[in-house]
Each structure stands twice: as C-alpha cells, then as structure tokens.
Amino acid sequence: MAMRVFCDIETLPVEKGELANYPKVCNCDDEEYRKLALTGEYGRVLTIGVIVEIDGHVTVSGCLGRDRATRSFHLQERRTLQAWWKLLKGFHPSTDLIVTFNGISFDLPILYKRSVINRVKPTVNLSFARYRNQPLFDVMQEWNKWDPRKHISLDELARILGLASPKRNGMDGSKVYDRFCEGIHTHEGLAAYCMADVKVLRLCWYRMMFPEGPEPEEV
C-alpha cells in the first residue's frame, strides 16, 4: 500500500526566557528574534499540518500539536515531533512519498534538527539528495525544475493553477507569531491556516502529476 504524506509546518521563535542560554542570539532585536522561528537551532515547531493518503484514499487530515479536548496547541514540541515520527513509522522511502512546498530547504530540515534537540529518534531515514522527487517531492523545486534563480510562492502557484489561494484572508507565515501572541482564541485560526496550505499543496501536486481517474477526494 503506497503512502503519500502532504505536510507543512508552522514555527515560533524560542521562548524569550531561554535566549540567555544562546550567546549568539541573546542580544537580538525584535526583528531578529522573530526570524529565529525560521531556524532549526533557535525556532520551535508549533504545529505540523498533515494529509495522509494510503493508495489514494485520505486516512489522516489535521494538525499535530493540538490538545484533543480543547483543540488549542499544547506547546509540547517533543510530543508533536513524536506524533510526526509515529505517523511515518510505516513509511517506505522506495515506494512512499512526502510532499512539501520548499520542504527540502525548510520544513524537513527543521523537523530533523528539532527532533535531535528534543531527543526524539526519527523512525525513518530520509535522503535529502536534491534533483530527485522520491521519497521527497518538493512542489516548489519541481515546478521550477530546480533552477536556483527562480522562486515562486505557494500563493502564486495556486493562483496560476486556478486554485483558491490559501493566503486569501491576508494571513501568511510572517504573521504566525503575532497572531499566536494574541492568545489562545487564535489557535483554531492558525490551525486552519496551516491546513489550508496543506490542502492547496496537495491539489498543486495532483495538477502536476496528471493522474488518471477522478479528482482527489476533498478533505
């Protein structure tokens, strides 16, 4: 049974109270602090949005890192990473696929680094070799045919392909930290934002693959 995992992560900077532990960044200004969220060394994983297909049928859809009862983010990064690797426990690199958007440079390296930092052992060893699309399919790189001079956002690609943009409500990755700081009432919206990216990522992949048969099931 072939598995496809579509995923996207949202990250936050390290807690401000922990900055003193890191001489390189302890005196960073506010703008620099926010950019720490983009690193595996000084960022932290807030949530991982996933859609999992087995033989083309959706079996999992949602955000890892949320409390089942309250639906708010539990902020236990180690627990979130453990859930991610548990999800991939049956993943076979020769036949299965992880689909991301710029994931080879951003999402997946961060997940690996944060796993090492949190002492969470990966359940599968993924090759980060470039210019390939198995077992990692990076939609951004495949669209540009790995041309380093070119860049396209998920928002732009979705619009070009005639799909609903996941950024249509004005939200984007640069606003995740600010929205998170507004309080627990924003968690549902942040999860919805993350999943909107995953859903559009999945549709972009299907468009690029020209699959035979019906359109993918909605999630």
Image (cartoon, helix red, strand yellow):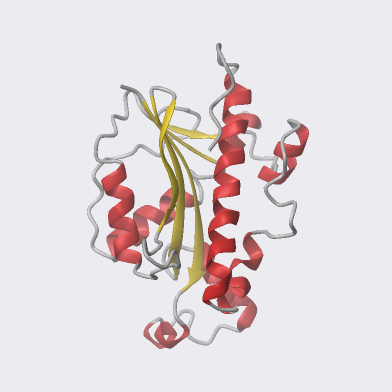
Between 131 and 174, which is closer to the camera in this rendering? 174
Between 190 and 106, which is closer to the camera in this rendering? 190
Looking at the rendering, which quadrant does residue 148 occupy?
Answer: top right
Residue 82, how many percent across, how many down?
28, 56
Residue 68, how many percent across, how many down?
36, 61
Q: Quadrant of the N terminus?
A: top left
Would you place residue 178 above or below residue 168 in this image? below
Callout count: 0
**Residue 171 visible within the image:** yes
Q: Write the residue at 47% across / 84% down.
A: 16
Would you place residue 177 above or below residue 156 in this image? below
**Residue 153 visible within the image:** no
* 10 left or right of 152 in image: left
Q: Write the residue at 37% across / 84% down.
A: 21
* 64 left or right of 197 in image: left
Between 29 and 55, which is closer to the camera in this rendering? 55
Residue 26, how many percent across, how many down?
47, 85
Q: Write the residue at 50% across / 63% down.
A: 11
Looking at the rendering, which quadrant does residue 181 occupy?
Answer: bottom right
Residue 185, how many percent across, how many down?
56, 73
Would you place residue 192 above or below residue 159 in this image? below
* 80 left or right of 33 in image: left
* Residue farthest to the top, as pictured: 212
* 165 left or right of 126 in image: right
Q: Write the residue at 45% across / 75% down.
A: 14
Would you place residue 192 above or below residue 77 in this image? above
